[in-house]
Image (tube, rainbow, N blue to C red):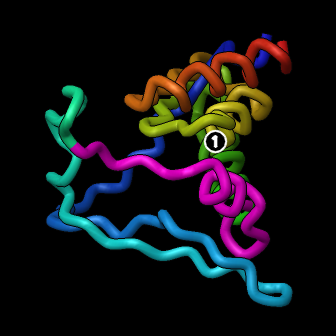
């Protein structure tokens, strides 16, 4: 099974605001992704009628296909798992905000993490992530 493990990739830091991609515009061979909000935006706002931080399908696709960042994240996940004293299988990984493709969770599982948890608050993205994982086995 693809999701048999996941390693926690934690970096000690204080977060007061978050810079996250939300809008993608293709321009020649470049994709520009940018957005800004406070780290509390979207918290406790899963109720109908409240705004929750989410992305449209094209933004998720642009983030997944970003050749300047995605391979670096993949390398970091694999390196972290392989550097664990007990090996990748000794690690548990949490992909918080996994999105519709569960991209980083899948990378961790394929790299041999012992457990993988892919968490997504957006119901539509969560359904898509489940379907992606199921398709991959």
Q: In which quarter of the image is residue 6?
A: top right
Residue 120 horizontal side relative to residue 86, left or right: left
Residue 75 within the segment the image draws in magenta: no
Residue 78 position, x and y percent, is 71, 46
Q: Where is residue 13 in the image (x, y as percent from the top left)?
A: 24, 61
Q: Residue furthest front?
A: 49
**Left or right of 124 in this view: 106:** right
Rendered position, 133 above or below 42:
above
Residue 90 visible, this angle = no
Q: What element carries label 1?
A: helix
The spot of residue 137 in percent (x, y) is: 83, 12
Question: Is 135 above or below relative to 85?
Answer: above
The residue closer to the viewer here, 120 or 22, is 22
- Which portion, as a residue range, is magenta? 51-70
The quadrant in which the N terminus is found is: top right
Q: How crowded is mark 1: few (under 14 residues within 10 Å), some or many (20 or more)?
A: many
Of the pair 62 and 3, the residue shown nearer to us: 62
Tell me residue 22's x, y (percent): 48, 63
Q: In this view, does 134 lie above or below 21?
A: above
Q: Mark 1 points at which residue?
A: 104
Q: Residue at x 19, y 27 (%)?
A: 47
**Residue 72, quarter of the rendered image:** bottom right
92 left or right of 67 in image: left
- Residue at image x 64%, y 17%? 130
Residue placed most toward the observer, 62 or 48: 48
Which residue is painted at 71% across and 27% down in the image?
A: 109
| In magenta segment, residue 58 | yes
Q: Residue at x 62, y 35 (%)?
A: 100
């Amino acid at each position: 099974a693809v999701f048999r493990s996941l390693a926690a990739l934690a970096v000690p830091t204080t977060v007061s605001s978050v810079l996250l991609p939300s809008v993608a515009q293709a321009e020649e061979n470049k994709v520009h992704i940018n957005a800004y909000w406070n780290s509390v935006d979207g918290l406790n706002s899963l109720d109908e009628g409240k705004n929750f931080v989410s992305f449209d399908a094209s933004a998720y696709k642009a983030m997944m296909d970003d050749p300047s960042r995605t391979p670096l994240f993949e390398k970091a996940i694999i390196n972290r798992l392989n550097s664990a004293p007990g090996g990748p299988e000794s690690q548990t990984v949490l992909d918080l905000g996994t999105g519709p493709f569960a991209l980083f969770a899948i990378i961790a599982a394929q790299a041999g993490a012992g457990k993988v948890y892919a968490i997504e608050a957006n119901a539509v993205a969560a359904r898509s992530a489940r379907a992606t994982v199921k398709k991959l086995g």
